[in-house]
Image (cartoon, rainbow, N blue to C red):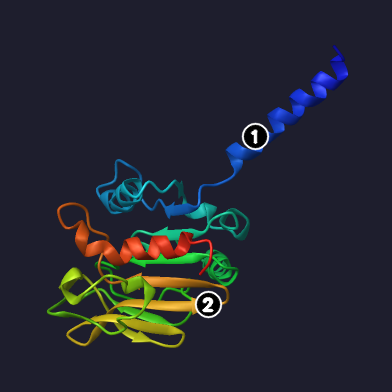
Amino acid sequence: MNVRAFAGSLIGILCAAVCLAAWPNPVAVLKLYDEADSLFPYVQRDVSMLESLDVAHDLLAPKDLTAEALAGYELLILPTSWAVAQWETRERAAAIRGFVHAGGALLATEAGWGGRLAPQFFPGALVIDTHVPVEGSCEIQAPTHPILTGISNSDLADYADSMVVGHAAPWVVLATITYYPVLLYSEYGAGFAVYSCDQVRRPPESSLSRWYVNTVELALAEER
């Protein structure tokens, strides 16, 4: 046996294995809280939904929100905007916007309680009021949009912990509750972003998160 050739082949196999192990899954979920934190269930909701859809995903810490780290993903999920002031920096916001512009998808949900927020990571101005929840009849405003495929008004939650009180182009309102936007979509460069004032639901209310399933499917589609 040619020992040198064998060693070269072995190194090649090991390198390939390392590369495969390092290559990220298609979806990244921002891990805002540790498992011991009382707010970790907000992260777990997204993890449970992705697992039910059999979608492979990674959990990223805020420090991992860099252009280099995000480049290998197709979808970035921000489980809740509660803690945005704790982790958002100018550099991280720019990395997220760059990720979307390059063709990635961003899905952010429910801002909860924390004051009036204007996150800088969104592709376009969006102001969220988290002090006043909104309740009432949810009405679809863009029935032909792919995020709302197969969805009627009754498939959307009639309550949200936050409301959007200001938005600008390129945001498009997909659904409202008593005239307040609660589900919005924005195209930016080659990618897109979705913000929902409602959080992803788990059984038995998972049917109310069909918009979430559609967003994941659109983000992972080979052709958009």
Q: Position of residue 184 (x, y in %)?
A: 35, 78
Q: Residues within 10 Å of mark 2 (few under 14, many from 20)?
A: many
Query: Residue visible at 78% across and 25% down?
Result: 9
Q: Is residue 19 above or below residue 89?
A: above
Query: Residue visible at 38% across and 53% down?
Result: 32
Q: Is residue 28 above or below residue 90?
A: above
Q: Secondary structure at mark 1?
A: helix
- Number of numbered markers: 2
Q: Is residue 95 above or below residue 37?
A: below
* Image-quadrant location for residue 133: bottom left
Q: Position of residue 92 (x, y in %)?
A: 53, 64
Q: Residues within 10 Å of mark 1 (few under 14, many from 20)?
A: few
For label 1, the residue is: 18
The residue at the far top in this view is: 1
Q: Which mark is residue 99?
A: none
* Image-quadrant location for residue 23: top right
Q: Position of residue 204 (x, y in %)?
A: 14, 53
Query: Residue visible at 44% across and 82% down?
Result: 125
Query: Residue visible at 26% across and 49% down?
Result: 41
Q: Position of residue 149 (x, y in %)?
A: 32, 71
Q: Amino acid at mark 1?
A: Val
What whole-number distance in Å separates the C-alpha atoms at marks 1 and 2? 33 Å
Q: Is residue 137 above or below residue 66?
A: below
For label 2, the residue is: 188
**Which of the two residues, 133 or 177, is positioned nearer the viewer here?**
177
